[in-house]
Amino acid sequence: MAEKGQSRTARRKQKQSKKKPLWKKVLLITGIAVLAVGIGVGALFTYYIATAPEIDASKLSIPFSSKIYDKDGELFADLGAEQRTKISYNDIPDVLEDAVLATEDSRFYDHPGIDIWRIGGAVIANITDGFGSEGASTITQQVVEKSFLSPEKKISLKVQEMWLALQLEQEYSKEQILEIYLNKIYYGNGAYGVAKAAELYFGKTDLSKLTLPEAAILAGLPQRPSAYNPYKNPELMKERMNTVLSLMVQHGKISRNKADKASKTDIPSLLNKDSSDSSPYEAFLQKVRKEVKQKVDGADIYTDGLKVYTTIDTDAQEYVEFLLSDKEDNPIDYPEPVTNPAKPDGDKVKLQAGMTVLDTKTGAIRAIGGARGGLENDGYNYATDISRQPGSTFKPIIDYGPAIENKQWSTYHQLNDDGPYDIKGTDDQINTWVGNGHYYGWVSMRYALQQSLNVPAVKTFEEVGRSTAKEFANGLGIEFGNNKIELTDAIGGASLTNPTKLAGAYRAFANEGIYNEPYAVTKVEFPESGKTVNLKPEPEPAMSDYTAYMVTDMLKTVVREGTGEQANVPGLPVAGKTGTTNRDGVDGPPDSWFSGYSTNYTISIWTGYDNNNIGISNTKIPHALFKNTMAELSKDKDTPDFTKPDSVVEVAVEKGSRPAKLPSEFTPGSEIVTELFVKGNEPTATSEKYDQLDPVEGLEATFDKKSSTIQAKWKYNSDADVSFEVSASVDGGEMQSLSSTEETSIEISNVEPGSEYEIQVVAVSNETDANSSEPKTTTVKVPEEEENEGDEGEDGEGNIPSVSNLSASVSGSTVDVSWGYNGPPARFEVVVTQDGSEVNRQTVESMGIVIEGAQPGSYTISVTPVGQNGGNSGVRGDSSSTEATVEGDDSDEPDVPDVPDVPQDS
């Protein structure tokens, strides 16, 4: 090992001093043993030391990379193998060494490998706050832990760590140990060792050129390399840098003046702008790292030489990354970058996207799309890191799922979308669609979800109850700010989530109600110790199988014919839900979501901008991402439909019935719909809406020669409130409606001599338009007209003159017809034809009629007098005719108010 220059007098003296005699080490170990006895572990102390591993020099010098395996056990990543640049102690500048020692181990050159003062402070903290709450590891102990032991927080491992640290100090110099430490430590963004970190962050391959702020950054990073990532969190990194500078002042490494000057440094101005390149599988590996670190007591896949068995499907991961890329053959039509309103000087930002793909049966994560264009090294992961409002994707989770689970609502359950919903205590309202002003009245729960109607969703949430809705959502891994659920959570407008959490919740609907946290790692092996830690989460029931199936069936309707239609994959049974958000003052939704599933895969997608004051121009990108991903993953793979459990029954019900009723034998087929019910909660009552009324009885008709009319009468013995529709057919022609009456008789005038009339009477309910009876008919023959004999008598019998002065005037759509008459008493039969077709026939006693609402066209009006009294009764005079023309409007068809486009759900 080469030595540094002579300027480090104090350190050189430390280096040249003799090693402390072994008896002092033994005395120190005895002290540790006494301390161990004091905290209750003295009986095991000797055993821990005896079972400690041997110091293996190869493990100190050879960088150990972690092996990452896919779902089939195939190696797909070897982390750490090529991300190191080894340096010697002489390459370490004073400013870097001073920063590291002041931060990590200020008495490094004074202690024998363990620091009694730090141990004492840590013991007190661990007694008061719990074991593992504060560490006391020296740099030597950190080297031992990273080289020979697992990162678990156990007393046995801590004792072994201290013992091995004492041994390591006997075999290696302080300079060698510091060199090993700085070559082993992980600095984030895939960089191992301080040399690689300096190159990555600052573009410097010569450590002697590091500035004080840069050295302070490198000294501060290893504590929390992800959190202090200067690319993602420059402000947090600056706080950490200032902490290091303060420690350097405290330990006499620099002056306060130098520290103050360095603290004013702008972190982003130091960073190498070209270092953050995207890497294949980076989004998934980031999730793996976080999962391992969280579940294996701080283990790190970049530094601990582990074997990590994951759930990744590399084919799926590569396809997801392709869909998020800017490649020319990408089928997704992303919008062009837009100007960031936060930087109106021309700064452009592009639409971002995050996607998570789960195995529906297990909850295993098969792929993660972290960002458009790929995820930069340890960059911001839009699939796991975002916290954004989910919009209407929350409706199955917060509203309708809990309603089915706790109230056993059917998919037919009726909800009233009757207008804006007032939020109590405020002047705010919830609308079905923002700015649309259209409401649907009574609708089924299925239709409300299909069209993503907001008002029915909020009413459902209120009826279910907030605590019940919150408990249901918690069971699906959904959390709420301050652990409090808000009214606007009913439409996804309060709490925040990300695609991974949302996919986990939706997967339970697809998986018969069974939930487990989405996971990327199944197990971790520590090759040296042979220890294996299983990380696969245990599944738990989150809802009844009937709830899962009924929600799924409604979400299939959403995709087939609702707001999610553009996400439909032809030939594949899929279910899903759309969601968008709105924000005051923002043109367009800031967020657009789609979460859906088949029996094999569950996929959740978010799109939006980092700045949520930017609205999205195309809210259908998530639909396209889902459709393409699901279609690709399902190729050459059997995808069975969802299986209906025994707890669910299909029942045909009559549309519009409230509550649900069974259709009667008279219900038209067009008014019957099949819906799902929880077994035991099916409707039992049968609708009477379309039931037939009792028919009339005793219908008979006779011709009255004196009045030349047909007299029809009948009986009706039912107590029902009815009227009677009377129709007639002449000589076998089409049945024509004559009149509606509440009487049980009718007089039919203007009959044609020599014709046979079939009279029909139908009883019709006055309470509902749908109910009527079967028709009853009778026939009557009108005799031929008899010729009048002899001359006209003194009273003018047998001579009926025609009308005189027949005329018609037109005003708009009204035709005013008048005539004169000088003869025996008579009535007047008026026949109106339009363009040769009869449109009206009536008999009047006045000498004029008014035709209103006449359509444009040519009209012929014929008037025939018919005698009323004595020998003139029924005698017809000659017909007279006149013409009238109703002009059409000069404009085209009347304007029809435009129906506004249906906006996406919110």
Image (tube, grey):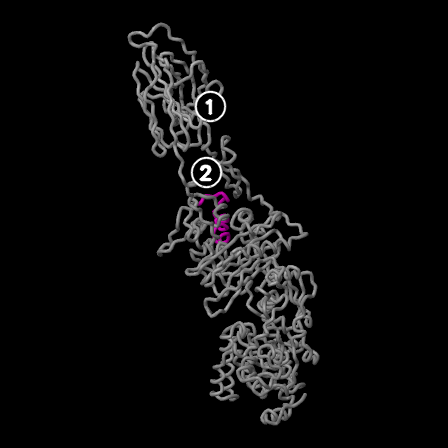
How many numbered callouts?
A: 2
Position above or below: 597 against 288? above
Q: Which amino acid lies under the numbered mark 1 shown in the image of this protein?
A: Met
Q: Earlier in the sequence, mark 2 or mark 1?
A: 2
Foreground: 735 or 501? 735
Q: Which amino acid lies under the numbered mark 2 shown in the image of this protein?
A: Ser
Position above or below: 451 against 687? below
For label 1, the residue is: 735
Position above or below: 878 against 537? above
Residue appearing at x 64%, y 53% in the figure: 634
Res. 143 image quadrant: bottom right
Q: Residue 520, how many percent across, how many down?
A: 61, 63
Q: Is residue 90 magenta?
A: no
Q: Magenta segment range?
A: 395-415
Res. 198 image quadrant: bottom right
Dominant SS in magenta: helix
Q: Is residue 406 magenta?
A: yes
For label 2, the residue is: 657
Query: Residue most toward the top?
Result: 790
The answer to whether residue 829 shows anywhere in this view is no
Mark 1 residue crowding within 10 angstroms, few (<14) / some (14–19) / many (20+) = some
